Amino acid sequence: MCICRCSLKAVSQGGFHLGHIPNCLRTLQCPDTLVVKNWLKENKDKLLSKCIDWILRDEQYISWKDGDEVCLLWIKGGAGKGKTMLSIGLVERLSLLDDASTVVTYFFCQNADYELNTLEAIIKGLILRLVNQKKELTKFLRRRWDKEKERFDEDVTSWRTLWDIFLAMLEHCQEHCQRVYVIVDALDECQDNGMAKLLMCLVRTGLDRPSKIKWLSTSRPLDCAEQELLTGPEQVLVSLELNSNHVSEAVKTYIAFKIVELDLRCRYGEHYGARYRLSLLKRLRTHICGLEDLHRDKVLTTIQDLPPGLHPLYDRILNQLSSGESADVKGCMRLLKVMMLAYRPLNMAEVGSVTGLSDECVRALVDRCASFVRMRDTDIEFVHQSARDYLAGTSGQSILDSYENHGHSEIALSCLSHLSERLKINLIDLPRPDSTRESMKRNELVASVDYAATFWVQHLEGAKRTPDTERSY
């Protein structure tokens, strides 16, 4: 299941009983940022507090959090610097001030998920978190809701309309709250050409000082952010590159934590003594990889053979992956290409409709591609954004293309073939037309056709945009 398809369930957690969710809020279909945060946070609880301690003492952060003059804080850093972990930690730290005088709303962009990588998604997610904390804010939605026609009387698919609604909510909060914190993580992962205009709007909301509204955004170096942000004294920057010593300490904490986990699982100390464990720790501080599936006899030599830096490491892994049985290599390359082109994360129930591969084959291929993708419950996802970035780059693309030509056109055809084999009248044999949707959610057949039915047209459009594609449909 896509990580933000539980929005209505999450609304009930925020104070609305599931049966009493306003129709205007239900129709808006806001992505659930609480679910996304918890999903990203998985297995990191024990590390968060230690990894963010340094920024809590940073002068720029303190002036943003507690002062009246600084309205916007931009945390900038390259890949793998821990920006998302910082954002999660700060959201939860600020949320500890859980009282009527403080409101915290947040969003985590994910560039591989169409539900989490647009301006509309960002603003909708921020709106949902506000409404969960202040139910009276639904009045700003109801004002635009036509009760008779059961629809909005404005275009709520436009981010500008949503922005106006969100600003009205913020103004209300500013009148009734001591502080309003707005946190947007990974702006660079938003796949929207309007980002510069949104940042311009955001900056203009902070021109009046003092302000109770506090904006925090994180991103990699981003051209539109460089142009629009930091244009006034009310905006400050924390650079993770300039704080590399703190980031390094956070990475060391993570490595030490993982060594303890590996030691408990593989019993390095029991078989080789404490010195072996210390050698692993020293090597891992310069070379990080997944070691869970390696036999303990091979762990240290594997780390010693790894090249420095992510790009050479991925080069080596992909080249190793391309050696083996031809069918296995082509399957791996097809899986990785599909993962690159999919408009949202795929789960096992639907991946066959996109790849044309069987579930058993896909599971085996995910294991072979473990340095790039992994299984989380029933979802298949990239192990890290850097893995996706590498495959999208020149080196990764050249290797992928040399083994398997499976682009948008092949995905569109695979989706249509899958649908033609499975679609029928009364797809899930409902006993009556007004049966609840719960039976649809639990139905395996519906799950298997979900992606194909939703996105085959987008892949067809993608094929038309591909320069070297000359097909007729």
Image: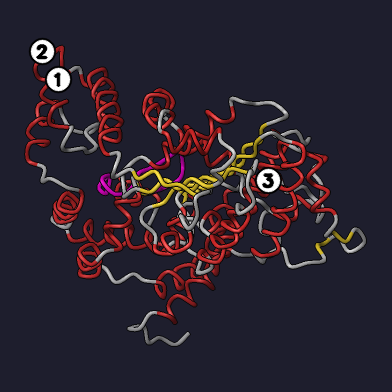
Q: Secondary structure at mark 2?
A: loop
Residue of label 3: 128
Q: Amino acid at mark 2?
A: Gly
Q: Are marks 2 and 3 in contact (CB under 8 Å)?
A: no
Q: Secondary structure at mark 3?
A: helix
Q: Is residue 455 magenta?
A: no
Specify few, some or many for label 1: CA neighbours under 10 Å numbering under 14, 14-19, or 20 or more: some
Q: Could you tell me residue 226's position as x and y percent?
A: 41, 60
Q: Could you tell me residue 182's position as x and y percent?
A: 59, 44
Marks 2/3: CA–CA distance: 52 Å
On residue 231, the disc is none
Residue of label 2: 273
Q: Secondary structure at mark 1?
A: helix
Q: Amino acid at mark 1?
A: Arg
Q: Nearer the viewer, residue 258 or 18?
A: 258
Residue of label 1: 277
* Residue ranking furthest to the right: 148
Q: Could you tell me residue 437's position as x and y percent?
A: 73, 49
Specify few, some or many for label 2: CA neighbours under 10 Å numbering under 14, 14-19, or 20 or more: few
Q: Is residue 462 above or below residue 255?
A: below
Marks 1/2: CA–CA distance: 7 Å
